[in-house]
Image: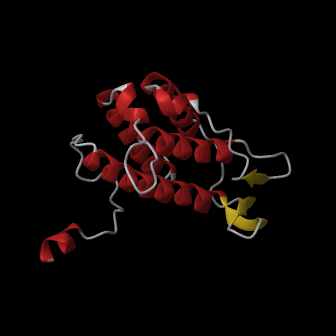
């Protein structure tokens, strides 16, 4: 398997383990300040990001602002698992040249802009983006007093874990 796709699959599959442990109430609990977002909104956002990547236009453009926002995945674990399974199945069978250039449309805060990427760079960004949202989910889990036994969940592989012990 591709060295870009395999880490993404490993990272995404952590969501399956999490979803199998959560209740629907836990998934959609948006009571944690300061942003009052839920685990479900973060997971849906991750899956929407991948969905955009898989919906490449015929002119080789990928619009990251054209998210479907599958809100059903935010409130029911079974819907989130289904959406996740669609993303992982698509990723498992993805046949792309990771060196191929694509134009990515995104809004960096000043309106939509087009950025030249390789498909591999976009997939690497998606994996890092997922890990970043897992870190936020970890904060929500902690505040909700929910345990999730995965010490790597939300940690970027380059983050030294021992650094927290030095404080």
Locate residue 55: give its quadrant: top right
Relative to 88, is 66 on the left or the right? right
Q: In the rendered view, would you say 162 is above or below 64?
A: below
Locate residue 157: give its quadrant: bottom left
Q: In the rendered view, would you say 60 is above or below 31?
A: below
Give how far across and how far down residue 82 sits, in percent.
51, 25
Front one among 45 and 59: 45
Q: In the rendered view, would you say 104 is above or below 46?
A: below
Q: Residue at x 43, y 58 (%)?
A: 132
Residue at the extreme bottom: 166
Front one among 79 and 150: 79
Give how far across and how far down residue 87 sits, in percent.
55, 36
Residue at the extreme right: 59
Q: Residue at x 61, y 58 (%)?
A: 122
Front one among 17 and 80: 80
Relative to 17, is 150 on the left or the right? left
Locate residue 154: give its quadrant: bottom left
Give how far across and how far down residue 103 sits, in percent.
76, 61
Residue 14 visible at all = yes
Q: Residue at x 37, y 28 (%)?
A: 25
Q: In the rendered view, would you say 39 is above or below 163?
A: above
Give how far across and how far down residue 140 sits, in percent.
34, 48
Q: Quadrant of the C terminus?
A: bottom left
Residue 3 visible at all = no
Q: Residue at x 67, y 62 (%)?
A: 118
């Amino acid at each position: 398997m591709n060295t870009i796709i395999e880490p993404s699959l490993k990272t995404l599959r952590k969501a399956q383990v999490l979803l199998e442990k959560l209740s629907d109430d836990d998934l959609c609990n948006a009571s944690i300040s300061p942003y009052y977002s839920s685990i479900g909104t973060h997971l849906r956002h991750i899956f929407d990001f991948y969905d955009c990547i898989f919906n490449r236009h015929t002119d080789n453009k990928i619009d990251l602002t054209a998210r479907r926002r599958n809100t059903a995945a935010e409130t029911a674990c079974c819907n989130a698992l289904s959406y996740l399974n669609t993303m992982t199945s698509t990723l498992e069978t993805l046949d792309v040249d990771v060196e191929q250039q694509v134009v990515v449309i995104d809004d960096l805060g000043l309106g939509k802009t087009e950025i030249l990427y390789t498909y591999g760079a976009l997939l690497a960004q998606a994996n890092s983006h997922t890990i970043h949202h897992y870190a936020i989910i970890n904060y929500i889990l902690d505040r909700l007093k929910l345990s999730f036994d995965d010490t790597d969940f939300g940690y970027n592989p380059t983050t030294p874990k021992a650094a927290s012990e030095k404080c």
